[in-house]
Image: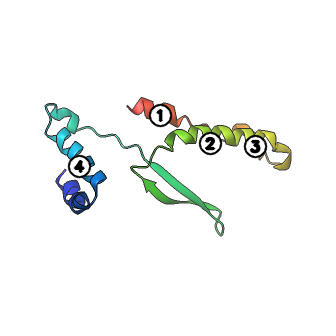
Amino acid sequence: PETLKSVLSSASQQDEFTRQLMAIYDAVLSGPRPEVANRSLAINRSDYMLDGATQRLLQVELNTISSSFGAQSTLMSQMHRQVVGKFAHFLGEAGRGDASRVPHHDTIGDIVEAF
């Protein structure tokens, strides 16, 4: 807790949103249920881009506040399966048109389960 407070102290003085987050953090730490202060849950969102030269996915960002797109990933994997299924004839051989190869992501369920 002290490291986090130290790192964010100047931001808390300059930014109202960060100041309010730190006030909530302090209230939890000093509240009537100290066992709650020992628990944490991070709902993060990682952004990736395809490196054209190496054809590798590279992580370009980790979002700790703007994680509302977690629920969108469930819809995105559904959309990818539909697109692959609909245009399978364009994807050629080697199973690239097999919609079942698109990973299933139930991020909405995972977030609810985490709570």
- Residue 92 shows up from this direction: no
Pointer 1 residue: 110
- Image spot of residue 25 (x, y percent): 22, 44
Which one is in front in this view, the residue at disc 1 or the one at disc 2?
2
Pointer 2 residue: 76
Q: CA distance from mark 2 to mark 4?
A: 33 Å
Of the residues shown, which amino acid type is indicated by label 3?
Val
What is the crowding at mark 2: few (fewer than 14 residues within 10 Å), some, or many (at least 20)? some
Of the residues shown, which amino acid type is indicated by label 4?
Met
- Name the image quarter holding residue 78: top right
Q: From the viewer's perspective, is residue 15 above or below residue 75?
A: below
Instruction: State the mark number for residue 84.
Output: 3
Q: Secondary structure at mark 2?
A: helix
Q: From the viewer's perspective, is residue 89 above or below residue 34?
A: below
First in sequence: mark 4 or mark 1?
4
Pointer 4 residue: 22
Q: Secondary structure at mark 3?
A: helix
- Residue 114 shows up from this direction: yes
Q: Residue at x 49, y 31 (%)?
A: 109
Query: Is residue 66 toward the left or the right of residue 101 in the image?
Result: left
Q: CA distance from mark 2 to mark 3?
A: 12 Å
Q: CA distance from mark 1 to mark 2?
A: 15 Å
Of the residues shown, which amino acid type is indicated by label 2?
Met
